[in-house]
């Protein structure tokens, strides 16, 4: 099964992606995680894209396309994958259709007015890629899942979040129609507790 997961920043997309990946045995391919890995390891690509990502803008299409093509060509994606963070606009969706069209596209829909609060309290783990909210785990620095050292993403500040949301509305939201026209779009209410959102996704994947 080839899946694409859509959702605004702070929609809980990363958390749901991990749950889907575990239950359905699909490799979780997150372009954001791949880019952040390059930044942490200060690779030439990481150095090039750091400023763009920190500001909440989109990385150039050629780089992103190359990264996704390379990752999806690996053996673990032979029988399917879960794409998170790609495609981000119609141009990228057209590129994806050119080499590996998704079977289903799930969009996690959330009320944008609560997103900023959700994101600014978010803490991420570099080791297990988990994300947690300070409302739930408190202001701790140790990952409750794997013991890694939690950090706050540079692009989780108020200015970058506003930019990311505006990019999402302008560029990514048109994908709703693009995939709906192909009969592949399934919307799930993301304003519910994590387990209930996941239940909504399970119903789509039956
Ligand atoms: P995410 O973890 O999906 O929120 O992505 C974090 C950042 O990585 C984005 O704000 C972009 O700067 C960059 N990025 C991730 N995926 C893409 C993509 N498909 N196209 C361009 N830039 C991307």
Image: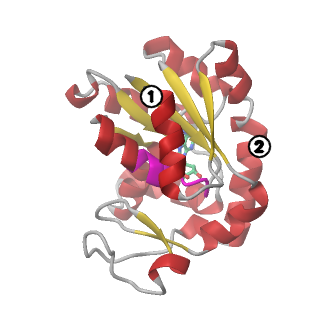
Q: The magenta stretch spans which residues? A: 10-18
Q: Main secondary structure of the magenta part?
A: helix
Image position, residue 190 (x, y; %): 62, 50
Residue that sits furthest to the left in the current view? 75
- Closer to the camera in the image, 94 or 112: 112
Residue at the image point whose x is 51% and y is 59% from the top: 50
At x 79% / y 61%, what residue is drawn?
A: 113
Q: Secondary structure at mark 2?
A: helix
Q: Is residue 138 visible?
A: yes
Name the residue carrying label 2.
Answer: 169
Q: Which of the marked residues, 1 or 2, is nearer the chain's N terminus?
A: 2
Q: Is residue 176 left or right of residue 16?
A: right
Residue 26, image x, y percentages: 31, 34
The answer to whether the residue labelled 1 contacts the one labelled 2, judged by CB atoms less than 8 Å apart, is: no
Query: Which residue, given by chain and number where applicable, does mark 1 sit on?
Result: 205
Residue 11 is one of the magenta-drawn residues: yes
Q: Mark 1, mark 2: which one is toward the viewer?
A: 1
């Amino acid at each position: 099964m080839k899946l694409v997961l859509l959702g605004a920043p702070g929609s809980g997309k990363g958390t749901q992606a991990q749950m889907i990946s575990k239950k359905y045995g699909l490799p979780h391919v997150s372009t954001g995680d791949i880019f952040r890995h390059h930044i942490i390891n200060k690779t030439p690509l990481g150095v090039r894209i750091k400023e763009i990502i920190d500001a909440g803008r989109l990385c150039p299409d050629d780089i992103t396309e190359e990264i996704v093509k390379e990752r999806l060509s690996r053996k673990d994606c032979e029988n399917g994958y879960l794409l998170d963070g790609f495609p981000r606009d119609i141009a990228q969706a057209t590129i994806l259709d050119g080499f590996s069209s998704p079977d289903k596209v799930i969009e996690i829909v959330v009320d944008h007015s609560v997103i900023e609060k959700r994101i600014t309290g978010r803490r991420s783990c570099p080791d297990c890629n988990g994300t947690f909210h300070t409302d739930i785990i408190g202001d701790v620095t140790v990952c409750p899942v794997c013991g890694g050292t939690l950090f706050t993403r540079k692009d989780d500040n108020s200015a970058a979040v506003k930019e990311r949301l505006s990019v999402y509305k302008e560029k990514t939201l048109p994908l709703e129609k693009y995939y709906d026209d192909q009969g592949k779009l399934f919307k799930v209410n993301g304003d519910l507790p994590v387990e209930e959102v996941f239940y909504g996704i399970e119903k789509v994947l039956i």
